Amino acid sequence: FQDANFPHRNEWRWSRFEGLSLRWTPYGMPRLSPELSRSVFFLYGKDPQSGELKGPLGTGVFIGAKHFVPVAENQSQQIWSLYAITAAHVALGGASVIRVPTRDGAMREIEFDPCEWIVDLKWEDIAAVDVSDRIIRRSPENSDHDAISFIPEEQFASEAFFPKYEFGIGEDGFMLELFSEHSGGIQDIVAARFGNVSMLADSRFPIERHDPDLDVTFSSPCHVFDIHSRPGFSGSPVF
């Protein structure tokens, strides 16, 4: 949210906590920071004989989880663990190789086998893999470190988010993803699609969906987003 450059205007707003107040309010669709685009990656398959990449075939997002590790008595240090998240049918279907940009303008592959991605198909069409030790961090020794960003897990739309921000049907939003017919070739080009919230999840009324690629049926509460999609968007984050 902080990386999205919203236009602002003064608006009268009603809140059960503050009553009527004049607020400097973000509105409309923001101009998106490049940091958001750097949190998105594309997924490729790999020919086992030639070693050539196939794709891109799907989209994913880097997520950061904060941990505190002890460094001395009564002292701890904050570190981030990084995870790559995509749709399970993408990773299990063979598109398990991540491609990331480096600061010198090149691209490199982080290769995983489909079996290295963690899934729980009883729950949802989601796959995750720990990339903390596979990302090249910025340091004096690395002039070509990875040019990526990530979404901190505390920015997820938790249940507390909706009443706090008075979030409801009709809100603007967007996806960042792969436009498969124009993915960029030697460089991955991130595209955006825009839409609106159509329905919010209700735990009392799960939505049933069947995934033909995995031959699995999911039944879970879902937010419904009214947005154009196409092949290659699988695994895209929704903001």
Image: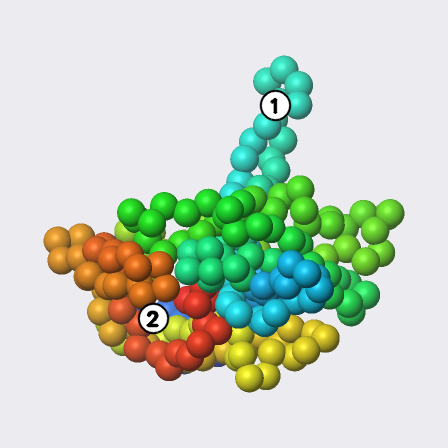
The vertical placement of 136 against 227, above or below, is above
- Give the foreground label among 1 and 2: 1
Answer whether residue 63 is visible to the viewer in this image.
Answer: no
Camera-nearest residue between 1 and 220:
220
Alpha carbon distance from label 1 to label 2: 45 Å
**Which residue, given by chain and number where applicable, does mark 2 sit on?**
22
At x 37% / y 69%, what residue is drawn?
23
| Residue at the far top in the pictured view | 73
Q: How many callouts does the rendering have?
A: 2
Residue 166 picture quarter: bottom left
Expressed as whole percent of the image width and height from the top left, the position of residue 215 reads 30, 59
Label 1 Cα neighbours within 10 Å, binned few <14 / some 14-19 / many ≥20: few
Describe residue 66's horizontal placement relative to residue 204 as left or right: right
Q: Estimate how packed mark 2 is, as few (under 14), some (14 to 19) or many (20 or more) residues with alpha carbons within 10 Å.
A: few
Foreground pick, 23 / 100: 100
Q: Disc 1 marks which residue?
A: 70
Q: Secondary structure at mark 2?
A: strand
Q: Quadrant of residue 167?
A: bottom left
Name the residue rendered at 73%, 50% in the picture.
136
User: Helix, strand, or loop for circle 1?
Assistant: strand
The residue at 24%/63% (across/down) is 209
Q: Amino acid at mark 2?
A: Leu
The residue sitting at the bottom extreme is 181
Location of the C terminus by quadrant is: bottom left
Question: Residue 43, image x and y in percent?
Answer: 57, 64
- Residue sitting at 66 percent across and 23 percent down? 71
Q: Amino acid at mark 1?
A: Pro
